[in-house]
Amino acid sequence: MRGADNIREVEALGIDLMGFIFWPKSSRFVAKRPTCLPTKCKRVGVFVDEDIKTIKRIADDYALDYIQLHGHESPEYCIQLKGMHLIKAFNIATTEDLKQTETYTGHVDYFLFDTKGKSVGGNGEKFDWTVLDSYAGDTPFLLSGGIAPDDAERLKAFHHPKCIGIDLNSRFEKAPGLKDVEELRRFLQNVTIK
């Protein structure tokens, strides 16, 4: 999210979290501070293998509630951010990929399961959600990876005791960083995670 009007309109939909991408290689990179930031939903800063001091500076500047780590950050790296609420993203294709989460247990608040792709995120592609049937960890997770407007019924059928929400991004955009508010509204009215 980057534009003030878009931020206000999306927040008014009653979402829980709003993401701001601080990875310069992303087409959604927040190069300058928006003139408006959300006040009701939680602010999430997305970083990829960023310097710890930079993360802390941006977290203070934007009053971030969560730090989402979307690179190759190690458990030791996460420990250096102790005191901050962390979401660690993992790229998933097979049940074998879920094993990488084990050493992060206790060091982050949530996992985010995304699709393995060319980029570290925002690929707009889905992975086989049945792979998550094998996830038996204690850490709650967010489901990500190319979730689109036509996935409402599929999401209603998806149940996992540790799934606490969904990440909606590229498939709900008019352009990178610009959400289609009406598309989001229709989708959110049609789906709930149980």
Image: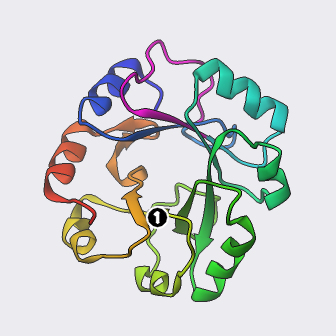
Q: Residue at x 64, y 59 (%)?
A: 119
The answer to which image quadrant residue 105 occupies is: bottom right
- What type of secondary structure mainly makes up the magenta span? loop
Q: Residue at x 26, y 67 (%)?
A: 151
Can residue 73 be found in the magenta stretch?
no
- The answer to whether 5 is drawn above or below residue 13 in the figure is above
Residue 136 image offset from top left, x and y in percent: 53, 81
Magenta-drawn segment: 29-45
Of the residues shown, which amino acid type is indicated by label 1?
Gly
Disc 1 is placed on an element classified as loop
Depth check: give the residue in front, 145 or 113: 113
- The answer to whether 4 is drawn above or below residue 97 in the figure is above
Residue 135 image offset from top left, x and y in percent: 53, 81
Mark yes or no: residue 112 visible.
yes
Depth check: give the residue in front, 8 or 88: 88
The answer to which image quadrant residue 112 occupies is: bottom right
- The answer to whether 46 is drawn above or below residue 108 in the figure is above
Can residue 41 be found in the magenta stretch?
yes
Mark yes or no: residue 74 visible.
no
Q: Residue at x 45, y 34 (%)?
A: 42
What residue is disc 1 on?
145
